[in-house]
Image (cartoon, grey):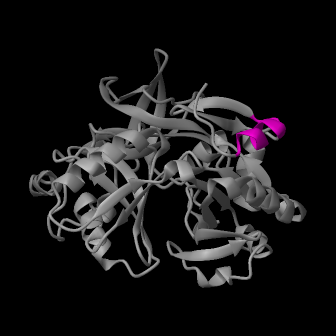
């Protein structure tokens, strides 16, 4: 039996199909099915239990400076209650994890991937031991639940449960001590679906009540609970990387298309020297690229990518038929010269070379809807 979030009983009662995910028993889908859940988020709103995610709290006079040393993005530019997305690297430039950094009134909050929580916390503690400033770190994952309400109706639905004007929370900003359905929470305008939405952090013991109230408030709009299957298809269409697929310790964030989130001009951070060398040598030799299959087939993680001569040149990191676009698409690492839109490649689908074309990413962008 894996670890369980505070909402495990709710998922079972709702008929969810449970699977192991990074050591957690999580819902992959509900009776509505992945396609219906995906469509709900794109057109209305869907509610996700993401309480398996990890949370590390950094306190002390130099907590923000410590976070800035730890990650590749620039934490020092954060305003109070602002959030940023960033890779966290090893000294060789490989990715430890990608995470969110919250600058809050009395602390810095790091939100990390569920499957990496223990590894990440050990890494953060190791960096703390070598850091000269005043900082304390604490893993608060087991005490914290996280719900994600995502989709164009998310604000309208969540607003019914709070007196806080949610319109005041800008994208990648947060508000602390917000009363949601009678419980105190941290509410941020963030998400992992490519849609507008909110993530609600609250004490684990309050999760069931708030989960039920959000579903009740959203019932007139057709808000439904959503599982990991829809979360993956939604993030994939928006080309939001998933650790273990587009990110790992064998790839640096420049290869993974995250140059915007790597601030080489700032003072030293872990991995800085290695990433500077990559840039000075003309940039990464391989890059993450998106592609569309031109023949029948599905590109799965690990499938080889071939050049027009049929030679292996890369590997698929994620792939599936896109529910929104109605096409079979994929992501994978290719030599930089082949990662340009319009380049013809092929995917080795169980011994069959399926023609494909490199396309511009992201596959889906909300503003173009």
The N terminus lies in which quarter of the figure? top right
- Indicate the position of residue 125 as horizontal and vertical percent values: 28, 50
Q: Is residue 9 magenta?
A: yes
Picture residue at 36% right of the left edge, 60% below the top = 86
Q: Quadrant of residue 260?
A: bottom left
Q: Is residue 337 left or right of residue 218?
A: left
- Indicate the position of residue 335 as horizontal and vertical percent values: 26, 40
Is 315 in front, or is 201? 201
- Indicate the position of residue 321 as horizontal and vertical percent values: 62, 38
Q: Majority secondary structure of the magenta segment?
A: helix
Residue 291 in sight: yes
Q: Which residues are magenta?
A: 7-16
- Can you name the residue that lies furthest to the right here? 220
Is 109 in front, or is 264? 109
- Indicate the position of residue 153 as horizontal and vertical percent values: 75, 68
Picture residue at 78% right of the left edge, 72% below the top = 161
Q: How many marks?
A: 0
Q: Is residue 154 magenta?
A: no
Picture residue at 42% right of the left edge, 81% below the top = 80
- Can you name the residue that lies furthest to the top here? 351
Picture residue at 25% right of the left edge, 71% below the top = 62
Q: Where is 233 relative to 263, above or below?
A: above
Q: Quadrant of residue 137?
A: bottom left
Is 65 in front, or is 129? 129
The C terminus lies in which quarter of the figure? bottom right
Q: Where is 117 relative to 166, above or below?
A: above
Is 361 in front, or is 73? 73
Residue 74 in sight: no
Q: Is residue 97 left or right of residue 364?
A: left
Q: Is residue 246 left or right of residue 204?
A: left
Q: Quadrant of residue 19?
A: top right
């Amino acid at each position: 039996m894996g670890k369980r979030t505070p909402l495990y009983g709710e998922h079972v009662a709702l008929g969810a199909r449970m699977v192991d995910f990074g050591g957690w028993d999580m819902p992959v889908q509900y009776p509505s099915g992945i396609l219906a859940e995906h469509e709900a988020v794109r057109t209305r709103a869907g509610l996700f239990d993401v309480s398996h995610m990890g949370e590390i709290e950094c306190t002390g006079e130099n907590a923000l400076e410590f976070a800035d040393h730890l990650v590749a993005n620039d934490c020092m530019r954060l305003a109070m209650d602002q959030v940023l997305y960033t890779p966290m690297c090893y000294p060789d430039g490989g990715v430890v994890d990608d995470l969110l950094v919250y600058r809050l009134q009395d602390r810095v909050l790091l939100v990390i991937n569920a499957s990496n929580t223990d590894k990440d916390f050990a890494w953060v503690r190791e960096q703390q031991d070598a850091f000269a400033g005043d900082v304390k770190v604490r893993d608060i994952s087991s005490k914290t639940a996280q719900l994600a309400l995502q989709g164009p109706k998310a604000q309208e639905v969540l607003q019914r449960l709070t007196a806080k004007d949610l319109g005041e929370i800008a994208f990648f900003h947060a508000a602390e001590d917000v009363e949601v359905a009678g419980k105190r929470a941290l509410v941020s305008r963030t998400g992992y679906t490519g849609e507008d939405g909110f993530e609600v952090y609250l004490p684990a013991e309050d999760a069931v009540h708030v989960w039920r109230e959000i579903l009740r408030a959203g019932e007139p709009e057709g808000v439904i609970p959503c599982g990991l299957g829809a979360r993956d298809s939604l993030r994939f269409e928006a080309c939001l990387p998933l650790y273990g697929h587009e990110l790992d310790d064998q790839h640096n964030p420049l290869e993974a298309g995250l140059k915007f989130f790597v601030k080489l001009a700032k003072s030293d951070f872990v991995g800085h020297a290695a990433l500077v060398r990559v840039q000075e040598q003309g940039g990464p030799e391989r890059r993450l690229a998106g592609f569309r299959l031109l023949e029948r087939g599905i590109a799965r993680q690990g499938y080889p990518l071939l050049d027009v001569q049929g030679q292996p040149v890369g590997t698929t990191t994620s792939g599936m038929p896109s529910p929104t676009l109605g096409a079979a698409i994929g992501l994978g690492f290719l030599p930089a010269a082949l990662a340009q839109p319009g380049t013809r490649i092929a995917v080795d689908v169980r011994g069959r070379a399926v023609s494909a074309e490199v396309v511009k990413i992201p596959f889906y962008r909300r503003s173009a809807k």
